[in-house]
Image (spheres, helix red, strand yellow):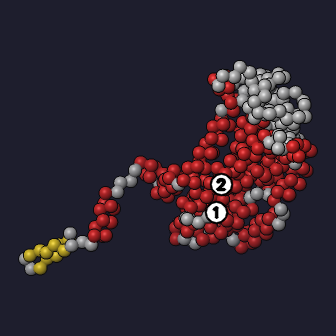
Amino acid sequence: MTTASSGNSTEQLPVPTKTATFMDEFAVREIGWWEKTLGPEAYRILKGIVTNPLSIIGTTLIILFFTTGLLAPLLAPPKPNTRDPYMIPRDGYSPTPREPGSVWKSNPPPMPGWLQALGYEKWIHVMGTAGGQWDIFYGIVWGTRTALKVGLIIEGLTLLVGILVGALAAFYGGWVDNVLMRITEIFMAFPSLLAALTLAAVLTPVIGKGLTAPLIALVAFGWMSYARIIRGDILSVRERDYIMAARVIGVKDRRIITRHIVPNAIYPTLILASLNIGADVVSFAALSFLGIGTEVGYADWGQLIAFARNWIPSLYKYWFIVVFPAMALILFTLGWNLVGDALRDIMDPRMRGRGA
């Protein structure tokens, strides 16, 4: 209610219902501890993540993989005094795969407690063996660590390079922008996976077998999209009033870029990064499948699928040598994609309700 005076009398004027409801909600709203700590924008994003159904499913899958990687020594204990726990143990050297549930015959690793709790007295091949008697369960469990390591390292480095190139190009403009963008376009002209395969094949004899060569190759041909996206966003952010004010009072360029421009332009790039983590792991698995990178027997999902190449005509019988590693790849990629899609919906209202 509002009051209006007419001479010596006052008259109560009614307040519109919608206005009153809005004023009541505004008046009683309290800012919680999380919103105070994180800030309004970060709090809105976090709230969207924990309430969005896609995000909940994707986050659950990601947590499951992180838990599996963390508990790998308990889920699939390596053999005592092993040189490298990432090397998959073998149950002999027979080329014929063995079905899930078959008993380990030759020099088994320590039996995990969870298998004993299920009533088993002997270590079994939970998911069978691949050709060459590589234990598939061990390879998938320890391959989870490989996938997480590979995905986070590749995405972190490509994101860093892309942000650096895009930020410098957009902030300084002119010849700096022209040179950096022409270099970016040259790299984008190459088919990324084929270029990475070629570079990894060249680096492997020099560096040796391992994760390093394929990681370098995938980073070298994976940063360009980030550079272009961050450049476009910074071109709009750099003309805003608070950036102009910072320049007027003499703030150094490095501080303007790192404290004001990049934090306000990076959200679309982070969404793309979350979507690409799964794709990076699939690309790394493709290189492993082709024999580029890790040595034979290293716990990697792509290499597990490679062990099945000689048995493709008999997959109706030996289905498990492909299904289990492929499901690990699919679920890992699905988890990151769902989180990325949810972040896109949360941070871009125009995309809400639309398909991917």
Tag 2: amino acid = Asn
Image point (66%, 32%), residue name? 71
**Quadrant of the drawing holding the C terminus:** bottom right
Please indicate, yes or no, whether residue 267 appears anywhere in the rendered image: no
Left or right for 344, reference 27: right
Tag 1: amino acid = Ala
Q: Horizontal and vertical percent for residue 197?
A: 86, 53
Left or right for 32, reference 322: left
Q: Horizontal and vertical percent for residue 163?
A: 68, 59
Q: Horizontal and vertical percent for residue 41?
A: 50, 58
Q: CA distance from mark 1 to mark 2?
A: 10 Å
Image point (81%, 59%), residue name? 192
Label 1 belongs to which residue?
A: 356
Residue 55 versus residue 228 in the image, above or below? above
| Numbered disc total | 2
Label 2 belongs to which residue?
A: 337
Left or right for 193, reference 269: right
Q: Horizontal and vertical percent for residue 148?
A: 70, 43
Disc number for residue 164: none
Image point (19%, 74%), residue name? 13
Image point (72%, 29%), residue name? 76
Residue 49 versus residue 95 in the image, above or below? below
Please indicate, yes or no, whether residue 24 appears anywhere in the rendered image: yes
- Badge 1 vs badge 2, beta-carbon distance below 8 Å: yes
Viewer-proximal residue among 346 and 2 = 346
Viewer-proximal residue among 86 and 352 = 352
* Dot placed on the residue nearer the N-terminal end, 1 or 2: 2
Viewer-proximal residue among 123 and 261 = 123
Residue 338 versus residue 244 in the image, above or below? above
Secondary element at image label 1? loop
Furthest residue toward top: 121
Furthest residue toward front: 316
